Amino acid sequence: MSKIKVAMYGLTSEGYRLAAEVVDKAQVTIVDETLQMAMELDSAFLRKNPDLQELMGSEPLLSFKPLELVLGEAQVVFFTPKLRRPSDETLIEAGSKLR
């Protein structure tokens, strides 16, 4: 039986933690909204790199996929972008990213 395809839109600590929670039940891809690219995560990778800050600090060679391909194939998308503004502006920023 094939796993459901899940995309985490936002390379954030929250998205990375959520990916670790669902990776055993789903095929997980995390999207870096700044680079507009995505990388597939599996349980072995997440065990080796349990923390996003540690992963980014080690600068490993990562295999990226085009954003359009990942979002087109995803059956479920979790929206976990970086929001850096005060609360009123956060809603506007989140709305523009969702579009």
Image: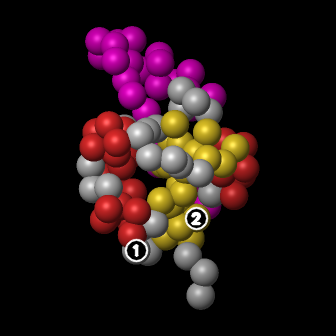
Q: Is residue 35 visible?
A: yes
Residue in the image at 53% along x and 67% along y = 27
Q: Which residue is mark 1?
A: 24
Residue 65: x and y in percent read 66, 48
How many numbered dots are placed on residues in this image? 2
Corner quadrant of residue 76: bottom right
Compute the Cα span from label 1 to label 2: 12 Å
- In the rendered image, the quadrant that contains the C terminus is top right
Q: Magenta segment, which residues? A: 75-99
| Secondary structure category for the residue under label 1 | loop
| Secondary structure category for the residue under label 2 | strand
Q: Work out whether residue 80 or residue 12 is closer to the camera in this orientation and state it.
A: 12
Contact between marks 1 and 2 (CB within 8 A): the answer is no
Q: Work out whether residue 46 or residue 62 is closer to the camera in this orientation and state it.
A: 62
Q: How is the image coloured?
A: secondary structure
Residue 43: x and y in percent read 39, 69
| Crowding at mark 1 (Cα within 10 Å: few <14, some 14-19, many 20+) | few
Residue in the image at 45% along x and 66% along y = 42
For marks 1 and 2 on the same chain, the one whose residue lies earlier in the sequence: 2
Q: Which residue is mark 2?
A: 5
| Crowding at mark 2 (Cα within 10 Å: few <14, some 14-19, many 20+) | some
- In the rendered image, the quadrant that contains the N terminus is bottom right
Residue 52, compared with residue 3, is above or below; it is above
Residue 81, compared with residue 9, is above or below; it is above
The reply to whether the magenta stretch includes residue 80 is: yes
Classify residue 9 as left or right of residue 87.
Answer: right
Corner quadrant of residue 2: bottom right
The reply to whether the magenta stretch includes residue 71 is: no
Identity of the amino acid at label 2?
Lys
Corner quadrant of residue 45: bottom left
